[in-house]
Amino acid sequence: MAGSLNFLPDDRYNAFITTCREAPFGDGALAGVAVAVKDNISTAGIQTTCGSRILEGYIPPYDAHVVELLRREGAAIVGKTNMDEFGMGSTTETSAFGPTRNPVDTERVPGGSSGGSAAAVAAGLVPMALGTDTGGSTRCPAAFCGIVGLKPTYGRVSRYGLVAYANSLEQIGPMARTVEDASRLMSVIAKYDPRDSTMLDRPYDHQPSADIAGLRIGIPEEYFGEGVDPRVAETVRDAIGVLDNLGADTVPVSIPGMQYALAAYYVICTGEASSNLARFDGVRYGPAVDTRKTWHEAYQELRQANFGTEVRRRVMLGTFALSAGYAGRYYAKAQVARRNIRQDFERALRDADVIAGPTMPTVAFRLGEKTDPLSLYLADILTAPANLAGIPAISVPCGRVDGLPVGLQLMGRQFEDERVVDAAFAYEQEVRR
Ligand code: GLN
């Protein structure tokens, strides 16, 4: 494959789309550390496909900001990881390069859309990886594979060089086997970059602390309700009990806007996607259009042939939701619902310092088990709210159901990523003893 050489002992899991031999240099914070990078993050000289045929063979001429930082700190980028096409999915099954398998049980999905990054970390191929999270894509695969995944506060990590899916929702985030390693990677990638105009100058540089005495943990009933596997809910309640024993206090909170979260998320993300993906026209990237045809025919044929079913579905849904006469009915209402959810979290995070619940409503499902789009969209119910609100959220492994990992999700106030990291660290340290 372009720009790559195979050398990893991969790949029972199909975790990588491209592997590369890259000599680490420098003596920075990640000197000699092997890091895997999700394939929607631009890497100069290394193929970047977003899991899509339409970008097969595309080699970016520049590095994403986070990749510049990795290289500057001496990390070795060992490969580009498999993902749901353009990040659209929760299983990694929509990748044009075949699904990734969950290292815990290879008949199961690793979650998505950063499934390749999670599998590479869980299988021990790399200690840490970058994922991206638009509606749960670092946290879902972290939960399903039994690792740690963080979605930073919106505006804390530069999106420069990230191939956009839904700009207003997504952040690049660290994935690792331990909270400490996730925090280490976060400390490297969360630095101000004027090329992302939605960034705030709030660098992250933090050593996790397990002291959580007096921390107020909000428990939203909505996170333990209908649709959540009772065994998963029970496992997460036990984990919260561990934090309680460490001196934290639990308080009931409520996010009433949750009932509209998924509807709002899917209107906003498809709308933004339909606009972002218009640039894949066969002229600037990937397979070339047939120039003997009319523009309309050529554009249609190219996109028909090179976008998968889920991507085409979302482009159509998003175009519809934004079209004249319908935008007020869908997009404007979704924005109102989004604002309500953000306010619900603000209110809840006055009574509590962090909010805890399950990351996913179930454990990892079997490959091919869920095929209808709606049931897959429902899997994002507990993760997408943090993206709508722009707040930090982490998933930390907290036990198993039927031998499969369960994730404890901790969400916090904007720019208090350190606090959710500390709470996850306190839990992890306690259960590892
Ligand atoms: N599963 C969600 C979606 O398909 C989230 C994906 C993501 O965070 N990239 O949109």
Image (cartoon, grey):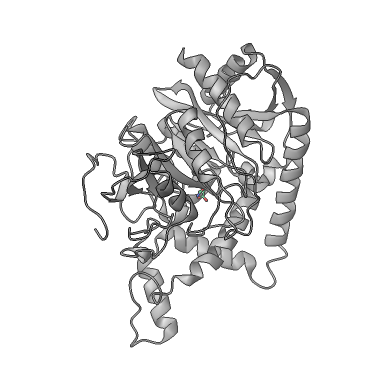
Can residue 110 be seen at all in this image of the molecule? no
Please report the residue visible at 35 percent of the width from the left and 36 percent of the height from the top: 102
Q: Nearer the viewer, residue 82 or 298?
A: 82
At horizontal 34% and vertical 64% (from top left) the residue drawn is 59
Residue 199 vertical position relative to residue 344 in the rendered view, above or below: below
113 or 430: nearer the viewer: 430
User: For the point 34% across and 37% down, which residue is it?
Assistant: 126
Residue 415 image point, x, y percent: 66, 40
Whether residue 331 is visible: yes
Residue 194: image location, x then y, percent: 60, 58
> Residue at position x 28%, y 47% from top?
23
Figure check: 300 above or below 419:
below
Question: Count the marks: how many?
Answer: 0
**Which of these two is toward me, 392 or 205?**
205
Q: Position of residue 67 (x, y in %)?
A: 43, 51
Task: Tell which of 376 and 235 is nearer to you.
Answer: 235
Q: Quadrant of the N terminus?
A: bottom left
Position of 71 with respect to 332 (left or right) is left
- Which quarter of the picture shows residue 40? bottom left
Residue lying farthest to the front in this orientation: 27
In the image, taking residue 186 as reference, residue 246 lies left or right, namely right
Please state the horizontal and vertical placement of residue 265, each as a whole percent of the image.
61, 51
